Image: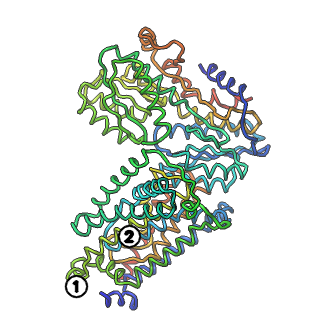
Amino acid sequence: METAGKTTEQSPSPAISALAMRYLVLAALIVIASLGFGFANENFFSLANIGILLRSISVLFIVSMAMTFVMLTGGIDLSVGSNVAFAGGVGVIALTATGSAPVGFLAAILAGMSIGLINGIFVGRMKLSAFMVTLATFALARGLALVIYDADSINVSNAIFLWLGGTSWGNVPVVIPFVVLVFAVLSVVLYRTTFGRDVYAAGANFKTAFVLGRRPERTLVWVYILSGALAGLSAIITVGRVSSGQPWAGLYLEFDAITAVILGGTSLFGGRGRLFGTILGVLLYGIIINGLVLTGTNPYLQSLIKGAILLSVVLLDSWTQRGKQR
Amino acid sequence: MTLKSTSALAAVFAAAATGSAFAGNDDALDIVFINDGHVAPYHVAWLAGFEDAIAAYGEAFPDLEISGRWLSAEGSLERMIQQAEVTINEAPDIMFVNAINVDAFEPLVAQAQDAGITWIAVHSAMESADYSFTLGDITNGRNQGMAMCALSGGEPFQVAIMLGQAGNPSGEARRQGILEGISTCDNIEVVAEQPADWDTVRAQSIAENWMTQFPELDAISGVTDAYMYPSLAIAANSGRSDLQLYGYDGDIPILEQMRDGPVMADILLSGTREGWNFVQMAYRLHRGDELEKVYDFFTPLVLTEENHRLALENGFPENIEVYSVDQALDVAANGFREFGPDSVR
């Protein structure tokens, strides 16, 4: 497996080249979209708007990076949005009960991990469909959140708990350097550790990985736990952003994350993709959302535009792949 | 009826006591309406009324550069917060925000006010907002429940209530009102309560389940007319012409069903007229009128004349204002008359 990992790093395969092409396309789209929105509304390039844009996609960055790990294994995690609400609820309740922000942080992350553990055991150990399992925990976590909150929000005033999601240094939200840090740490985990190589191996060929003794079922468990932990982290950011715990936080977040990960070139079938592509995918998605709001585009058209862009990228990807095969 | 409601609004304005200074300039008025959705029939009418009113006011007052746009968060709290942040950075004159949860928007209200924007909380009142545009949901729900009492015939009567999204303040207030109204008589049993998340499709499956689970069900009460569409279809398909429906919103297609159909009562909000009222309110603020900090939208109960007469015979309070179906349809379809440019000249 280590050899396979090194091969992937050192001698680019056609798949990697296709990814490089995807990144170029994404980068070009980011530039074109930015220029277009900037031309339509000069405020687009203001520092304040850039800060708003980055803050608004900070949670999506983190959840999408987690989703990249999951999708690299050939899986999917539909529970992340609900898990953000659930983990936030547990964190806020723990904070309220103890008055301690660290206890609240820990509770949120452990709560997120517990949903991840359930996903991991059912998908990894019991070999159940990731789609079905996480669809179930999607409902389970949202239901738990509604019960915990009694369907109502809980105000939070603890400055330490709110710091990460709510503080800005000038126009730069504190959460942005934090997201960069998370990206760096996850990159090391994915590209420089045995676990990272196992993630690729489990997605590329589960049976082969099993035969080679890489224990892919255990890898899957840990990948879903990681996804849950990052959902817990996202919950802390979300609570900080809105100064309250919200039972409906994270609604549709899983779909935004899956969209961004696919835009970033990660294969739905596993084994192919990189975190950098996901970052580009989230950035493009965020710019489009921000620009459409800023330019006052009719919301009935917004879904159409988002869908058209996604379809274009998928078609371009398919066209690029065919070009490589000729 | 139109005159009556306009007079009621005029009385509200006359009684004005509070309100923040309006920060817009003299010859321009930029309004942004951030809503929680845009696909439910009520939303569609609401947003169309808002757009029509912007155009009408622009035409009627050419010296005023009036502009407006609406955004839909599609049910997502995070999306709505992002939209509010972007909008604050754009510094319009007035923001109407139908917050998914008001607590989450407290920090943004202060931010908007610092930027000189007038923040109007829609449906759920906010103490920190400059104004709150409210519906009197508890009173409306109570009126619906009391109408059910009066029209249930005094015999044992089973009702199932279809709720909004769990925790939504407006939906919870409507539920509270309906239960209060029902509690004024002792023959009605609430056999089920179920959130349908304002979703017509979900409402359909819930109503289908109820028809099977409660074969003796006498009525379905809903906190929005969006639930009446599937309920009407299911009642018709299952041959339950005796099933009574109690709605809330004043959607024109549902009001039309009241004449001969199973819809016994409705609450006349009407999305169209609410959209028109937003622009009228913004215009009044712009020209310096003082409005009450909590602005109550006039929302009467709607009954057919025959049912109103029957209800009164059965003890329905005479002091509750009731519109006939014709009156309600006229008001619902002609928001421009009640809240258009002529109402503020």
Looking at the image, residue A324 lies above or below residue A93: below
Disc 2 to disc 1, C-alpha distance: 24 Å
Residue situated in front as seen by the camera: B339 or A201? A201
- What percent of the width, then of the height, locates residue B178? 43, 27
Q: Earlier in the sequence, mark 2 or mark 1?
A: 1
Residue occupying the far top of the picture: B313
SS class of the residue under badge 1? loop
* Marked residue chain, label 1: A
Tell me the quadrant of the picture where the C terminus of chain B can be found. top right
Tell me the quadrant of the picture where the N terminus of chain B can be found. top right
- What percent of the width, then of the height, locates residue B5? 62, 22
Judge depth for marks 2 and 1 and give the one in front: 2
Residue B11 quadrant: top right
Residue situated in front as seen by the camera: A282 or B18? B18
Residue occupying the far front of the picture: A98
- Residue at image x 47%, y 53%? A97
Which residue bears the numbered disc 1? A212
Residue type for callout 2: Leu
Which residue bears the numbered disc 2? A226
